[in-house]
């Protein structure tokens, strides 16, 4: 059993609350648009860290992380990318891979819209954790925590942080 902390779209924004909210997590996953190596360093120093780069990430982050990442967590196959769409409207760059070999869990970011949705056609869970940073139009910053046990995802929690709370900085 593993407890996962999931975020996306920090866009160079660092909040000390990330560490507070992910204290109980075994791993942290970032679905792209990280924005700075300092965010990578702080999160990876805290817990084992997996990430993909996003469309706004620079060359340093693109050299460190891939556009897509597929791995096993417990007995579940996970696929993560930054631009992925959602059930019924998957992005063209990922659609073929999803339909030919669906994972148990598909994670993406990019839209800044929190979405947790089961895709009955592919039999997978889709999670977009929304945006943890302050760049963009969203009014609430969001993070997600959940547990992976075997091929089961449970105890999913959405953490909402008002954009106006100030315990953070742009790195």
Image (spheres, rainbow, N blue to C red):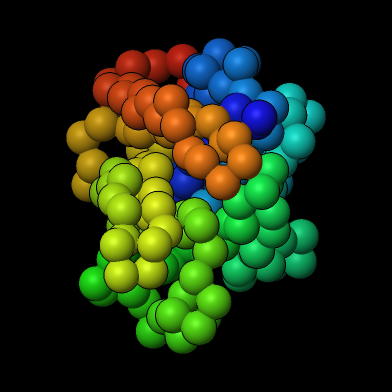
Q: Nearer the viewer, residue 81 or 155?
A: 155
Q: Residue at x 33, y 74 (%)?
A: 90
Q: Residue at x 38, y 69 (%)?
A: 122
Where is residue 97 drawn, in percent x and y? 52, 80
Dividing the picture into quarters, in which one does residue 92 lie?
bottom left
Q: Nearer the viewer, residue 81 or 75?
A: 75
Q: Is residue 62 left or right of residue 90?
A: right
Query: Which quadrant of the rendered structure holds the N terminus?
Result: top right
Q: Nearer the viewer, residue 58 or 138?
A: 138
Q: Residue at x 69, y 43 (%)?
A: 74
Dividing the picture into quarters, in which one does residue 62 lie?
bottom right
Q: Residue at x 35, y 28 (%)?
A: 158
Where is residue 95 drawn, in percent x and y? 41, 80
Q: Nearer the viewer, residue 125 or 32?
A: 125
Q: Is residue 3 left or right of residue 170?
A: right
Q: Is residue 16 visible?
A: no
Above or below 85: residue 1: above
Query: Which quadrant of the rendered structure holds the C terminus?
Result: top right
Above or below 89: residue 120: above
Q: Is residue 147 visible?
A: yes
Count numbered badges in the picture.
0
Above or below 80: residue 49: above
Where is residue 8 drawn, in percent x and y? 47, 46
């Amino acid at each position: 059993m593993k407890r996962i902390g999931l975020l996306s779209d920090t866009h160079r924004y660092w909040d000390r609350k990330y560490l507070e909210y992910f204290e109980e997590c075994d791993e942290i996953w970032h679905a792209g648009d990280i924005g700075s190596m300092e965010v990578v360093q702080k999160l990876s120093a805290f817990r084992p860290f997996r990430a993909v780069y996003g469309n706004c990430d620079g060359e340093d982050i693109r050299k460190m992380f891939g556009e897509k990442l597929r791995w096993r967590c417990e007995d579940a196959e996970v696929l993560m990318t930054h631009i992925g769409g959602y059930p019924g409207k998957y992005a063209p760059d990922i659609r073929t891979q999803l339909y030919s070999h669906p994972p148990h869990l598909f994670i993406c970011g990019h839209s800044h819209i929190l979405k947790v949705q089961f895709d009955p056609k592919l039999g997978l869970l889709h999670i977009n954790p929304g945006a943890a940073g302050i760049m963009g139009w969203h009014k609430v910053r969001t993070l997600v925590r959940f547990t992976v046990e075997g091929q089961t995802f449970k105890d999913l929690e959405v953490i909402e942080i008002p954009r106006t709370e100030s315990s953070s900085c742009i790195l």
